[in-house]
Amino acid sequence: MTEAATWRDVKVKARAADPMWDSTERVARRREMHEQMLASVSGAQSAEIRERLESPQQQRS
């Protein structure tokens, strides 16, 4: 069984494998992708909430 790794260890290995890991462009791209992922999750949650709110109204009709 493999031992769990900390994020610090993972980042050290990533930097060793790819010295450009911390470049300004890569950091900005990761931040942008993270924001897009959060927006997508928020959108999905909003859709689920809307569905739940509409469901009882449709049953009453």
Image (cartoon, rainbow, N blue to C red):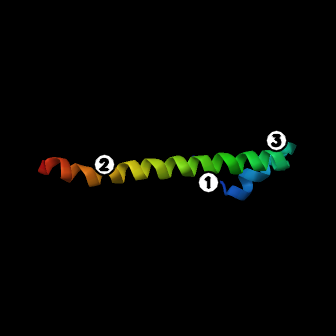
Secondary structure at badge 2 equals helix
Three-letter amino acid code at the position of disc 2: Glu
Q: Mark 3 touching mark 1, by CB under 8 A? A: no
Q: Find residue 33 and report its horizontal and vertical position in percent.
A: 65, 45
Q: Residue at x 75, y 52 (%)?
A: 11
Q: In this rendering, does residue 2 appear at all?
A: no
Q: Find residue 61 and report its horizontal and vertical position in percent.
A: 12, 47
> Does residue 7 appear left or right of residue 14 in this picture?
left
Q: Find residue 7 and report its horizontal and vertical position in percent.
A: 68, 56
Badge 2 or badge 3: first in the primary sequence? 3
Three-letter amino acid code at the position of disc 3: Ala
Q: Find residue 19 and report its horizontal and vertical position in percent.
A: 87, 44
Residue with the mark numbered 3:
17
Residue with the mark numbered 2:
51
Residue with the mark numbered 1:
4
Badge 2 or badge 1: first in the primary sequence? 1
Q: Mark 2 touching mark 1, by CB under 8 A? A: no
Q: Quadrant of residue 25?
A: top right
Badge 3 or badge 1: first in the primary sequence? 1
Q: In this rendering, does residue 10 appear at all?
A: yes
